[in-house]
Image (cartoon, grey):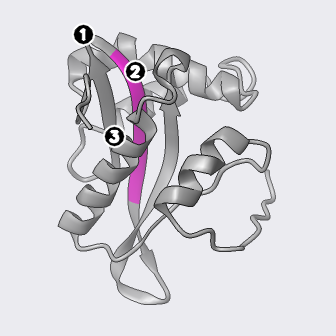
Amino acid sequence: MSRDFVVRPPLPTDFDRWLTLWNGYNAFYGRSAASALDEEVTRTTWARFFDEAEPVHALVAERAGELIGLAHFLFHRSTISIVDTCYLQDLYTSESARGHGVGRALIEAVYAAAATAGAQRVYWQTHETNATAMRLYDRVAERSGFVVYRHLF
């Protein structure tokens, strides 16, 4: 299948275009900059992508000079493995790019990055109402059956 986009690491000059996707992702999950993610969090997240000491990484999908998707992932230790595990924290495609293989390509690129880093597992979570994304996820990964609990301070 030929695709009209590329998946690549972000460049520092991509910030404004990435920010549009980042804001769309957060709006999708009902988070606004004012309520959940202030500018400092966004700027710090962006800076981490370019800091080699950070375990946080990003990929973007680009078509004709426009960013149409993003994936953020990080590596962390695990009590069940000696090698790091990869957590795909954020995955988002613009509405115009949905259904064209962008999400799948971003996931596959995270798989490749994780394999290169020596990780043996990639995992992620999504909201139970995200049925469209779950159709893709069911094709590219195994549903673990675990339920997420959290406590916020």
| 86, above or below 82, in the image | above
Please give the name of the residue rendered at 32% of the width and 31% of the height, measured from the top-left corner: 60
Query: What is the spatial separation of the Cα atoms under label 3 and label 2, in whole angstroms?
Result: 14 Å
Q: What element carries label 3?
A: strand
Asked whether the viewer can see residue 55, the reply is no
Residue 49 spot, x, y in % from top left:
31, 39
Residue 83 spot, x, y in % from top left:
31, 81
| Region rendered in magenta | 67-74
Chain-order first, disc 3 or disc 1: 3
The kind of residue on which mark 3 rests is: Ala
Quadrant location of the N terminus in the rendered image: top left
Q: Toward the viewer: 124 or 104?
A: 104
The majority secondary structure of the magenta stretch comes to strand
Query: What is the spatial separation of the Cα atoms under label 1 and label 2, in whole angstroms?
Result: 9 Å
90 inside magenta stretch: no
Q: Toward the viewer: 39 or 71?
A: 71
Of labels 3 and 2, the one closer to you: 2
Q: In the figure, is residue 33 to the left or right of 147?
A: left
| 43, above or below 140, in the image | above
Residue beneath disc 2? 68
Please give the name of the residue rendered at 41% of the width and 44% of the height, measured from the top-left corner: 104
Q: What label sits on residue 58 in the rendered view?
A: 3
Residue 130 sits in quarter: top right
- Mark 3, Cα crowd under 10 Å, few <14 / some 14-19 / many 20+, is many
- Mark 2, Cα crowd under 10 Å, few <14 / some 14-19 / many 20+, is many
| 125, above or below 36, in the image | below
The kind of residue on which mark 2 rests is: Ile
Q: What label sits on residue 65 in the rendered view?
A: 1
Residue 72 spot, x, y in % from top left:
42, 43
Q: What element carries label 2?
A: strand
Query: What is the spatial separation of the Cα atoms under label 3 and label 1, in whole angstroms?
Result: 18 Å
